[in-house]
Image: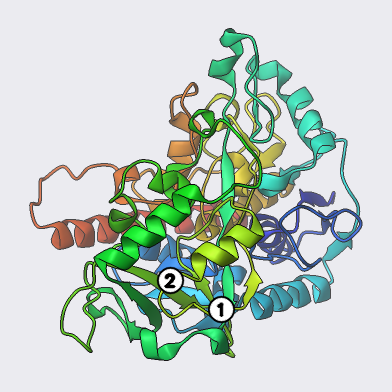
Amino acid sequence: MPSVKIIGGGLAGSEAAWQCARRGLDVELFEMRPMRSTPAHQTADFAELVCSNSLKSDSENTAPWLLKEEMRRAQSLLLEMARECAVPAGHALAVDRVTFAAKVTEAISREPRITVQREEVTRIDAHDITVIATGPLTSEALAAEIARLSIDAQESTLEWASRPPPNDPAQHEAHLYFYDSISPIVEADSIDMSRVYMAARYDKGSADYINCPMSREEYDQFYDALLAAQSVEERDWEKLNYFESCLPIEEIARRGRDTLRFGPMKPVGLKDPRTGRMPYAVVQLRQENLRADSYNLVGFQNHLKFGEQARVLRMIPGLANARFLRYGQIHRNTYINSPALLCETLQMKAHPRVLFAGQICGVEGYVESIATGLIAGMNAAAMTLGAEPVPPPRASAFGSLTHYVTHADTKNFQPANITFDLLPALEKKIRDRKERHRVQCELALNEFDKWMDLVGATAARS
């Protein structure tokens, strides 16, 4: 029996490899690190988290919870390991990123059916069953190879964030320019705890976040300093096409004086227990690891020079003497025009033995990347075993995510997180939001369970 090739040892690639191996298939997992690194990665471990350490809300009947619940029912390895490496984060699931990557690396490395190849892939044979899960930092050589494969789709397919916009206006519709971001991390013992307080928004979950409250005067001074700070490179910022859910803080600030207060510095639901009042603005810090010796500044990704970051961020109450373990950064995100290229099983329309998973297929977020890796792994295994891949039901979180990346507008395609907006509307209107979401989750899970039974029956017949 031929082996499945998985290119990329990130979240999606690791999950895809595991799903194939647990179905009795041999897997070749290609990862170019450490032979060739990227601007964002710091290790050669599989599933290294380079942005935040949060896998989003774990509150029942939320969209992220629904996606994770479907992953749990589909026996996701990485979700299981995330829970084993969880750190306090209120109602969210956050992990010790070092421990998490180490556990995934150990599990993949010791699996006898997975052969790890530490080398860069620059050529793809469309006759081989292959999952491409190389993420937002796909090497230029492999990106060019993906573009070659996509000629049959008669569309421009690679979305480069680091390239300038093409001079030919006709090419603009075929390209997206998108930058991904990394938030700063500070040492815990460099935070002045007398200036901050512990709380979770609306007291949901335990009080695990450090909150740095600002008065109006402190906020205004911080805002002015942020706007005046020098960026790493002088660019025409207004022409850059950022993913709206991951904007640099200086880009948010440029949109108006109060935009930060309605975004990453939103104080709503964070009453200061020392005063009994809600501050004018708040910066939240989330625990990075199990030792609780480092915290990241939630939503504070930026593209400022490191010296400027140190100067401006130390204006935040409690961070006057902060020691930074990592400064904020922005890196290129490469992803394909999935609605033009993929079907709902994440197979290429022109080359059905080639599948895509993770951020390169146009999903945004850790959980979404793992989920698409799981789906691609299941489908690659099905094909190898002689079965026909079955797309997940539209009503499920899996199905809604794959439906979006394969049916969105090809001219305005942007990465998406899982949200209730992606799920189909209910036939009967329910005004109460919580009840509506509960019903949507119940329906989704019922359809998902039927699909899993069908997939299992199909696999048993093959």
Report the front residue among 326 and 392: 326
Distance (Cα) linking label 1 and label 2:
10 Å
- Picture coordinates of residue 142 (x, y %)? 81, 37
Q: Residue at x 45, y 60 (%)?
A: 299
> Residue 151 vs residue 66: left or right?
right
Q: Earlier in the sequence, mark 1 or mark 2?
A: 2
Report the front residue among 113 and 63: 63
- Picture coordinates of residue 218 (x, y %)? 33, 67
Q: Residue at x 57, y 10 (%)?
A: 169
Q: Residue 450, can we see it?
A: no
Q: Residue at x 55, y 81 (%)?
A: 321
Q: Amino acid at mark 1?
A: Ala
Q: Amino acid at mark 2?
A: Ile
CB within 8 Å, label 1 to label 2: yes
What mark, if any, has residue 322 been given in the picture?
Answer: 1
Q: Residue at x 59, y 87 (%)?
A: 293
> Residue 436 vs residue 212: left or right?
left
Q: Is residue 318 above or below residue 112?
A: below
- Per the image, the residue denoted by label 2 is 316
Counting labels gives 2
Report the front residue among 101 and 201: 201
What mark, if any, has residue 392 been given in the picture?
Answer: none
- Picture coordinates of residue 412 (x, y %)? 46, 26
Q: Residue 43, can we see it?
A: yes
